[in-house]
Amino acid sequence: MLTGKLYDIQGFSVQDGPGIRTTVFLKGCPLRCPWCHSPESQEFPTELNWMKIRCLGLDACGACLNVCPKNAVSAGPESTDAKGDPIRYPEVDKTVCDDCGACAKACKATALYMCGTDTTVDEVMHRLLRDKPFFEDSGGGMTISGGECLCQPDFTFEVLRRCKEEDIHTAVDTTGFVRWEVIQRVLPYTDLFLYDLKCMDSALHRQVIGVPNELILENCVKIAENGGRLQIRIPTIPMFNDSREHFDRYGEFLRPLKDAIDVVQLLPYHKLGVSKHERLMKKEKIFVAEPPSDALMEARRDQLLGYGLPVQIH
């Protein structure tokens, strides 16, 4: 049976397209945005996570010790819990851990848990049909997201096709960094593309995010030319793409496409990804900065409005 690797299904979502929606989050992404608010979505395989706030500590539990076949789990140094009391937490050596899940199965408090579940199309549709009354009352529907959902093209296509059979509004949240043939295949079954534009400078895009942006921009134009509807999403990141000059480049690129654009959403940078990054127990640092001010966001909104674009701060 056709399965996809999911890391979440979120009902009553109002952030991922019009109306009340159920968002299906697929694992795996070719981009490496250092501010990513869902870093657990980046890798394609199922991964071990650890949520410190749930952990009972080794003195009270310790069930995760001595179950790892790779000996990747050990006792960490003494620290303090949320109340200031002494506690020792487990440490996982991610250079040795192969994400087998033995420690997560042993964890009594589910502080250690696996992120990423193989799910069938039928299982997803069962959930979506349960939520269909909310879609009908609100003008909502299903959004398939990621990671990059189009990196699991067969699964994404089949979910979209089945949704259209059930008269469910569909949205695809994409980075656009996939072959055009993949987008072209889902286009007839997609009512709206939530299309991320991170950066207009290809060299900077490659330097910071790990891939160039030419394919992303080309696919955006092709969607518009082939009758697709677009909701452009611009994460506004301090010291990266928040300058007046950069937003002029957004405006110049998007103005010829405005007839295909429902709205341009400006997404202010936030720090919600920091705690999720810590759960992955990786050594790489995540980008951290102060969120952009209301005044800056309003200035960038007004700047794009000057290009005749429908703009909102999300």
Image: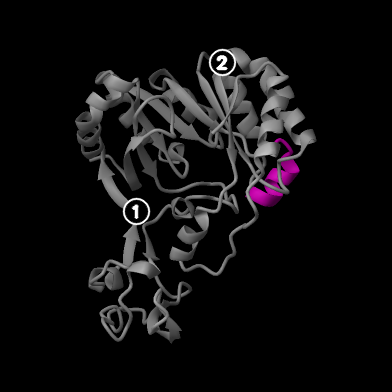
Local crowd at mark 2 within 10 Å, few (<14), some, or many (≥20)? some
Would residue 208 be counted in the magenta stretch? yes
As drawn, 43 above or below 170:
below
Q: CA distance from mark 2 to mark 1?
A: 34 Å
> How many marks on residues?
2
Viewport quadrant of the C terminus: top right
Sort mark 1 into few (<14), some (14-19) or many (20+) by Cα contacts within 10 Å.
many
- Which residue is at 29% across, 78% downward? 64
Name which of mark 2 and mark 1 comes first in the sequence: 1
Identify the residue position indicated by label 2 in the image. Answer: 260
Report the disc number at residue 116: 1
Q: Position of residue 179 (x, y in %)?
A: 54, 33
Is residue 72 among what the camera can see?
Answer: no
Can I make out residue 208 in this image?
A: yes
Q: Residue at the spot x=34%, y=31% of the render?
A: 21
Between disc 2 and disc 1, the foreground one is 2
Between 241 and 87, the one lying in front of the other is: 87
Quarter containing the N terminus: top left
Q: Position of residue 146 (x, y in %)?
A: 44, 42
The residue that appears at 58% across and 65% down in the rendered structure is 284
Whether residue 57 sits left or right of residue 198 in the image: it is left
In the displayed structure, 290 sits above or below 121; it is below
The majority secondary structure of the magenta stretch comes to helix
Q: Which residues are magenta?
A: 200-210
Q: Is residue 186 magenta?
A: no
| Residue placed most toward the observer, 313 or 42 | 313
